[in-house]
């Protein structure tokens, strides 16, 4: 506590302490150490990408997130999503991170539909949650046509498709719809949510905070 | 359809289902380099692409391979073309032809069948009739006029006497021209018991390249030599009813006076294989990134 100096913000005055002392006192607020953590989707599905993998972009976002931490802040090592899956990753983050810690989750969120919205809400109540949803590399135009063979990066299942113009349009629509649904679900649960593409990881983080 | 190399033809027949199944096998096992995507179930649901083009492409690939193998097997197409022929009915008029095990009687059934044959005789075909019992007797010479043949049936003697099959065959052979498709239709009910040895007559027919069609009524023994020759060059039938007699004559009318032509189909098969293969290749080659 220290004496109030003219010119200081009125709201900085600690009225109760001032009443006891009989003069205006101001409570000095130092830097409150914050806990930071990130849950990065390192599953094989994040190796998708036209020019580079979504995983690289997600890693950029996590690096930018890490740089946000000020001196004295703590970095909590939350396991990658690959080790536990998104649901278990969230559960673990909830346990290892102190209340009001800042959590970033970057991934493709294909599992989101399987996660109960209640869990998302619980995590959002305890932590400051930010989600970066990977944008489908082919969301803005499926660059495949005719007879194509496609492999699943995670399961390694392979399937052949005949892709015509209608299928291309359907895919574009469905990919956009999936992204919108994921963002809406996260926001409903109290998360800060944005998207990132394979080209920008760091800037996507700023966009999620509405700074860019 | 015949093949110069039947083993390759067999492989061609097998290759169609094999190639189709192979195309439908899990693609990873075939070494194709696929595009990669994060979540195949989502992509499948999002694309909702039709399955039939894949099946059609697989079938086209399998068909192209099969046709190519079939072309290598040397396909030959055998077609029968009707040619003007000469045929002599050699009818047994021995006493046993009176028997009624074939209705109305063996002799009458034979006459009815010949009438039926004459009615449906291909144009250009000439027919004649020789009757034999103890000796052979020409009833009508070769003629293309159906009415003349039908009228001649009335002149066939009533059944009586012995069975001189050899004489009848030689008499019929002498009625035939020296060249062109020629055949004798022997209608008899028994073993030779008079005149020339049927084996000698058979040898004469063979040296003259005359086809023999033997229609035997009842269960009486018949010359093994003539039976073998008939089986080799025409047909051999044992009949026990009038309807049975009509069937072999209809068969003789259908196939007995036709000449087979064999056409090499290697080129059409090869062209078909290349066309189907090229279509499949073009369809598949345009795929991938546009």
Image (tube, rainbow, N blue to C red):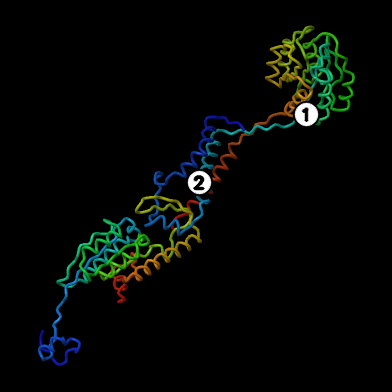
Considering only vertical position in the picture, is A68 above or below B234? below
Q: Is residue B129 visible?
A: no
Asked if badge 1 and badge 2 are on a common chain, one would say yes
- Residue B58: mark in rendering: 2
Q: Quadrant of residue B165?
A: top right
Residue A183 in the image: state x and y as whole percent: 36, 68
The number of numbered discs placed on residues in the rendered structure image is 2
- Residue B267 vs residue B130: left or right? left
- Residue B147 vs residue A110: left or right? right
Instruction: Tell me the quadrant of the picture where the N terminus of chain A can be found.
Output: bottom left
Residue A62 in the image: state x and y as whole percent: 25, 66
> Which class describes the residues within 10 Å of circle 2: few (<14), some (14-19), or many (20+)?
some
Task: Determine which residue is flagged by label 1.
Answer: B84
* Camera-nearest residue between B122 and A55: A55
* Camera-nearest residue between A208 and A32: A32
**Farthest residue toward the top?**
B194
Of labels 1 and 2, earlier in sequence is 2
Q: Quadrant of residue B175?
A: top right
Q: Nearer the viewer, mark 1 or mark 2?
A: 2
- Residue B55: mark in rendering: none
Instruction: Tell me the quadrant of the picture where the C terminus of chain A can be found.
Output: bottom left
Residue in view at x 53 percent, y 51 percent: B52
Q: CA distance from mark 1 to mark 2?
A: 48 Å
- Residue A135 vs residue B176: left or right? left
Q: Chain of mark 1?
A: B
Q: Is residue B23 visible?
A: yes
Residue in view at x 45 percent, y 53 percent: A148
Considering only vertical position in the picture, is B149 above or below A177? above
Q: Chain of mark 2?
A: B
Residue B8 in the image: state x and y as whole percent: 52, 32
Residue B95 in the image: state x and y as whole percent: 83, 11
> Under tag 2, what secondary structure?
helix
């Amino acid at each position: 506590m220290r004496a109030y100096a003219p010119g200081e913000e009125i709201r900085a005055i600690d009225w109760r302490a001032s009443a006891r002392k009989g003069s205006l006192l101001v409570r000095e607020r130092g830097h409150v150490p914050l806990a930071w953590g990130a849950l990065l989707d390192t599953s094989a599905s994040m190796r998708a990408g036209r020019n580079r993998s979504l995983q690289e972009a997600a890693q950029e976002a996590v690096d930018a997130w890490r740089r946000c931490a000020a001196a004295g802040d703590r970095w909590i090592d939350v396991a990658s999503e690959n080790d536990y899956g998104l649901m278990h990753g969230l559960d673990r983050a909830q346990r290892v991170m102190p209340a009001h810690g800042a959590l970033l989750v970057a991934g493709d969120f294909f599992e989101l539909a399987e996660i109960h919205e209640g869990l998302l809400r619980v995590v959002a109540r305890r932590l400051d949650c930010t989600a970066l949803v990977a944008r489908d590399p082919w969301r803005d135009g499926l660059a495949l046509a005719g007879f194509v063979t496609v492999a699943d990066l995670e399961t390694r299942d392979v399937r052949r498709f005949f892709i015509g113009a209608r299928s291309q349009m359907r895919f574009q629509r469905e990919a956009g719809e999936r992204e919108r649904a994921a963002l809406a679900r996260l926001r409903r649960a109290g998360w800060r949510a944005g998207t990132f593409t394979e080209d920008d990881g760091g800037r996507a983080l700023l966009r999620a905070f509405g700074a860019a | 359809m015949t093949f110069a190399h039947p083993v390759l033809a067999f492989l061609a027949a097998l290759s169609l289902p094999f190639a189709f199944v192979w195309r439908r096998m899990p693609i990873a096992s075939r070494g194709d380099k696929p595009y990669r995507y994060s979540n195949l179930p989502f992509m499948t649901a999002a694309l909702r692409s039709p399955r039939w083009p894949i099946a059609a492409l697989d079938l086209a690939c399998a068909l192209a391979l099969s046709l190519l193998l079939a072309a290598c097997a040397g396909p030959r197409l055998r077609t029968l073309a009707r040619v003007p022929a000469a045929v002599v009915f050699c009818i047994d008029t021995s006493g046993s032809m009176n028997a009624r095990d074939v209705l109305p009687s063996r002799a009458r059934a034979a006459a009815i069948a010949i009438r039926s044959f004459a009615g449906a005789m291909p144009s250009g075909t000439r027919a004649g009739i020789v009757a034999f019992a103890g000796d052979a007797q020409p009833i009508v010479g070769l003629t293309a006029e159906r009415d003349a043949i039908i009228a001649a049936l009335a002149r066939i003697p009533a059944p009586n006497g012995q069975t001189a099959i050899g004489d009848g065959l030689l008499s019929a052979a002498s009625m035939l021209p020296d060249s062109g498709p020629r055949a004798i239709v022997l209608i008899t009910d028994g073993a030779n018991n008079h005149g020339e040895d049927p084996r000698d007559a058979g040898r004469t027919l063979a040296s003259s390249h005359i086809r023999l069609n033997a229609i035997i009524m009842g269960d009486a023994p018949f010359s093994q030599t003539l039976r073998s020759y008939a089986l080799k060059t025409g047909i051999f039938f044992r009949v026990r009813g009038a309807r049975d007699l009509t069937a072999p004559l209809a068969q003789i009318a259908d196939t007995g006076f036709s000449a087979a032509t064999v056409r090499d189909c290697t080129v059409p098969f090869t062209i078909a294989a290349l066309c189907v293969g090229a279509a499949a290749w073009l369809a598949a080659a345009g795929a991938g990134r546009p």
